[in-house]
Image: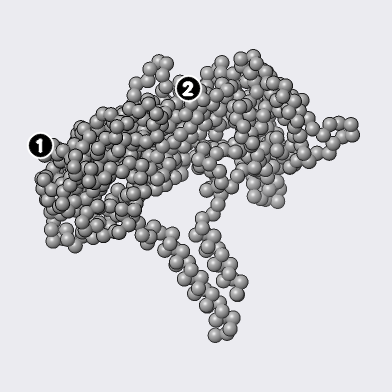
Amino acid sequence: MTPLQARLTATLFALSTLGLVFWALAHTQFAYALDYDQLAASTDASDHNWHRIQEDVHAEHVISEAAREIQHTPRADTLLIDANDSPNHGDLNASQTDVWRYTQQLLQSSYANQTSPLPSDFRSTRRSIDSGHTELRKRAEDGEDVLEKRQTNTRMIYVSINTCTQPAWSSNSSQEVGPPQLSLYIGQSGAQNVGPGSSASQYTINLVEGFANFSLSASSDVYMAVSAPVLPSYFSGSWSYDIAVSINAYYHASNDDVPFLYLVDTDSTSALLVTENLTYANPNDTVYQQWLSLLQPLPFTMFANADIEPTFGLSRSYCGLKNIAQISTLRNATLSGPFINTSMISRGIDNRPKQQFFLGNMTSSNDYFASLALIGNGVSSGKGVVGGGGTVWQQTGWNTKSDGNCQLVYDMPFCTDVAYAVPSNMSNTTTALGAMYDNYAQSLYQNFSYSLQQIQCNTSNDQRYSLARDCDDCAKAYKQWLCAVTVPRCEDFSNSASFLQPRNVAQAFLNSSMLSNDILLTQYKPMPGAPTLPGSPILQTWNFSYATNQSRNPNLIDQQIAPGPYKEVLPCEDICYNLVQSCPAALGFSCPYPGRGLEVGYAPRPSSATIIQCNFPGAVYYIDDARHLIPSTTAVLVVAMLAMALAYI
């Protein structure tokens, strides 16, 4: 072997080892996993760190075990779990305990058919529900394989609980915390040996935000105690809950780690939100079409409130959120109150099926909070349904706009990707306003299509204007650019964010008031890189600069719609660059230069952002488009390894 071959062999071996290590670290099953809801506070608990996690999670409300033992009041009778996959309701005052018995007869019942009633498993598009629980449960089940061969009556059971109602805040001060949580105790040593103060071996699970679940192997009756804590003086009332046991899967579910609902935009009285992609199937796949063809009632609902305080202590409980929700598809809307319209769409990033929620009749300049929820298993809910207790995801919050001259439009026939607030005078309905913008954009596109027809599109490679792009790419890029600049994304003029561009400052507000002279005479330099003509001022003012004293399309927006002053979220500059790159030079498209008008017409797309700093098709808050542009770390590593190896050849 030559020295060069030896170096190459050693390098490839080292890089292969590095790749193996990276692969192992990238797979979570090789990592040490610890899930609080699955921890057992029993005498034989093996993990010495579990109490630290418990202290972190429950630092706000700590009710000592000693206090529970002293004031613990068990009910006289043991209650029976009536069936698998069934909610069993209970009511508790402070310091009371209910004891439930799950019989061996239910344990040995037949398993249910768990075929998904939905077109596909939407959870696989991001992360599975309670992935930590799933992994721990899998390990527990795998560990019981040998035992179950010898003891066929041993099975895994899945216990879950939701708090449905809880004590109310009774102090005159502002509420900052929820009431203390219920606790769940699970044991197999009889009804008298489960609950607070018991010295028998048992599992203790404190509910978190109204939710807990736990799985264990059982071969005989299982006993569960639900215990209410001591109630602080600044709360009054009692608790109610639903507890369920199943041999199939958890009846209640919660995922507080992964967002699944995203804000698209708001105006002063409404908001538009969408779920995560529900499938990544291609548009011609049957699954894709099945998702879009779902009929009402759709699988997801939303529990929304104008204040966050009611959700304190219940944000992970389907039962609790359903009871306190001010706005929900499960509630009948009043004529003047908030309402929700929901539908299936494929608009947005990736153009994959999603469920859309439009909330109307809300209060301007107000905070709202909402939790996405799966109704039962998505098709059926309630007793006898595996997963029939529903699933909730982490909360999403937003603030409605205040100035009243931005209005949400969406589901437009031509500019299909437009779904955000646009300049408005609020005298038009959402449908009528959207039609004004959409028809105007479509009329401009018609002129472009005539010009594109003059280009030799279907010709030989040596006659094409580009080997990388064709006329279809040009048409798509032009439509995307046209809709972005013709239908501007509107924000309140009172919004002080630095990336927003003031527009139409010379016009009166809807209440006939004008901006003050101090604002109108604000010095402004729209093109800092442009040369200054002799005798002309270096700086302009807002009321005299075309970039600020009018809109992008003054004939439509300023004259016909007349919204008054507003601010614009500028289109992302790469939308303009993509147009120039995709179309033939004969059409004469170009983008403004930096310092020569680019900054007042377009904005750079940040590499990562949780807010929308430039407008692009499918933009939603708290999700940036960078994840679709950045190659995977694995791919980068493989390319780097190959490059290093080739360097020695």
Is residue 399 placed above or below 84 in the rendered structure? above
**Which quadrant, please, contains the C terminus?**
bottom right
Task: Please give the count of numbered marks on the rendered protein.
Answer: 2
Q: What kind of residue is marked 2?
A: Thr
Which is in the foreground here, disc 2 or disc 1?
1
Does 106 sit above or below residue 506? Answer: below
Q: Which of disc 1 and disc 2 is earlier in sequence?
A: 1
* Residue lying at 36% horizontally and 48% vertically, measured from the top left: 56
Q: Residue placed at 32% from the left, 57% from the top?
A: 49
In the image, 493 versus 293, the foreground residue is 493
Image position, residue 343 (x, y; %): 42, 30
Q: Looking at the image, which residue sits at the far bottom?
A: 1
- Mark 2 crowd level (few <14, some 14–19, many ≥20, 10 Å Cα): some
Task: Name the residue located 52 percent from the left edge and 18 percent from the top edge.
Answer: 429
Residue 363 in the image: above or below residue 28: above
Quadrant that contains the N terminus: bottom right
336 with respect to 206 (left or right): right
**539 horizontally vs 115: left or right:** right
The residue at the point 69 percent across, 21 percent down is 516
Q: Position of residue 238 (x, y in %)?
A: 24, 31
Residue 412 at x, y percent in the picture: 53, 28
Q: Considering the numbered disc 2 on the image, is that residue within a helix, a strand or a loop?
A: loop
Residue 411 in view in this figure: no
- Residue 76 marker: 1
Q: Which mark is residue 363?
A: 2
Residue 89 placement: quadrant: top left
Q: Is residue 183 visible?
A: yes
Question: Seen from this angle, which residue lies furthest right?
Answer: 534
> Which of the two residues, 131 or 121, is positioned nearer the viewer here?
131
Q: Are marks 2 and 1 in contact (CB under 8 Å)?
A: no
What amino acid is at disc 1? Answer: Ala
